[in-house]
Amino acid sequence: MSALLHSLQAPFALHGRNPDVLDCIANLSNDEVFTPPQFANRMLDTLAEAWAAAHGGASIWENAEVRFLDPCTKSGVFLREITRRLVQGLAGQIPDLQERVNHILRRQVFGIGITRLTALLARRSVYCSKRANGRHSIVQGFEGEAGHIWFERTEHDWERGKCRYCGASQAALDRGVELESHAYAFIHTDDIKVRMHELFEEEMQFDVIIGNPPYQLSDGGHGVSAAPIYQKFVEQAKALDPRYLTMVIPSRWFTGGKGLDEFREAMLTDDRVRVINDYLTASDVFPGVGLKGGVCYFLWERDNPGLCEVATHFKDWPVSTAIRPLLEPGADVFVRFNEGLSILRKVMALECGTTETLALPREKRFDELVSSLRPFGLRTFFKGNSKRRVGDLAIYQNGGVGYIAPADVPTGHELIDHWKIYIGRAAPGTGNRDTYPHRILSTPFIGEPGSICSETYLCIGPFASQSEAESALSYLACRLTRLLILLHKPSQDTTRRVYTFVPIQDWSRRWSDADLYSKYGISDSEIEFIEKIVRPMDLSANLFGEVSVDEDADE
């Protein structure tokens, strides 16, 4: 009997004393990343605090009735850590260790594997055996090998070359049974409650849903174009009506974008999102993962609506925390930085005459000067002639300058004969990590009359004179201007909409940050924050070859 107890206790008692194998395994990809145990426990701590606050200080780990589901389990870390906590918390109610483990793993802890491999890995993490009914399993009573960590191959439902559930490309993922389909069971159903009954063979009401869903799948667009799918896991989890929902997902949803606008609106108007912990760089959570825009985890409480606690994390900076609404009046995005929100309010107070809205009047919005994608109708791979002929226009293109006849320009003719500014659609790369301070924008430059650009650049203007264009150029170089852009910018792509918070200025003068700080009453502490986030810009920097573009990025 003592040997049996030792074998049951070992997976839990040794936690923290030896290197954790789940800290050592490599990620599947940047889209299917394993959650480090330390971070999983941080999410569980947030959950436990919310439960205690709503239940008179009671511990969720001492409740033998609470059911947990990880609908996208990979390493099994969430289920393992939940089990470990319940084993400790229920010791007083169920003194016999074997009976306690049986109860927890047969009645309280459930998972859905995302692939065959990860399902086996999760079972090994939770049951200490890849077979829940195997002789090495720490749980008794399961008839099947899967236990309550389910996986069966699911197929996509193809319609016109894409899956109607997840939007995956048929050309990319309809590839035979020898390879994973990546058709995740949790989101490939029209009725998730019926699906849960099919998977676990009984009516299931989960109190807590937790996980780290896959982030994106190929959608059949140009090159490596991919569509986000993590939002589908969040939406499906809400449809199960749990009491608590917490997931770690990319932070790009804050400002929407490809496939995320409806999700963003639903999240920002949902006052049951009570906690967001935002990590500016994904590598602080997932070491070695190159995921632009950072990641966050949120806590959604079905029965406890209210304001949201927003905490911003970055390396060794002090954590910034504020209690505030997710959607400020007049804004259509989540304003990511708490300090940035106070600065934005000062700008809006002067420009709008009120602190009640973050919406600039149309006549004061800089984005009205910014072109849509392909301002002259020419794709990024277009190359003009290398030699200029009489009457040709200069075209600023990826890699330098070419020349094109006016008759060959498809659109944007009203801009050709005016002064303007060209700016790269993609911010300069920083490898696989988000770094601060950074420049936010590629280096803008003056576009003379008689010039156009390819899709590599956006066009800002028109301006009545060279001096006006130079004034606007100086304004874009200011750190405060670029901070306002950052507050609406979820990724490298800098389309027209990221200029929404930027007011138009008087173009009869050159602008500096000192001028803008004075105009808007920016405090010393706010200046310190701005200069910690935004790097100075050298307008004399090399202009060509520093920009790249995702041709299928949304406007």
Image (cartoon, grey):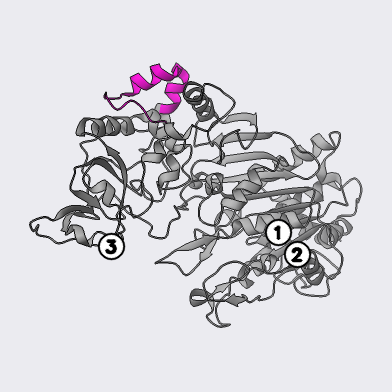
Name the residue tied to disc 2.
192
Q: Are marks 1 and 2 in contact (CB under 8 Å)?
A: yes
Mark on residue 381?
A: 3
Crowd around label 1: few <14 · some 14–19 · many ≥20 (10 Å): some
Range of residues picked out in magenta: 502-530
Comes first in the chain, label 1 or label 3: 1
Q: Identify the residue at image location x=90%, y=54%.
A: 96
Residue 75 in magenta stretch: no
Mark 2: amino acid: Ile
Q: Percent position (x, y) of residue 32?
A: 55, 60
Question: Nearest the camera: 164 or 545?
Answer: 164
Q: Percent position (x, y) of residue 301?
A: 76, 43
Name the residue tied to disc 1.
236
Q: Is residue 367 left or right of residue 272?
A: left
Residue 514 in magenta stretch: yes
Report how many numbered discs are placed on residues in the image. Answer: 3
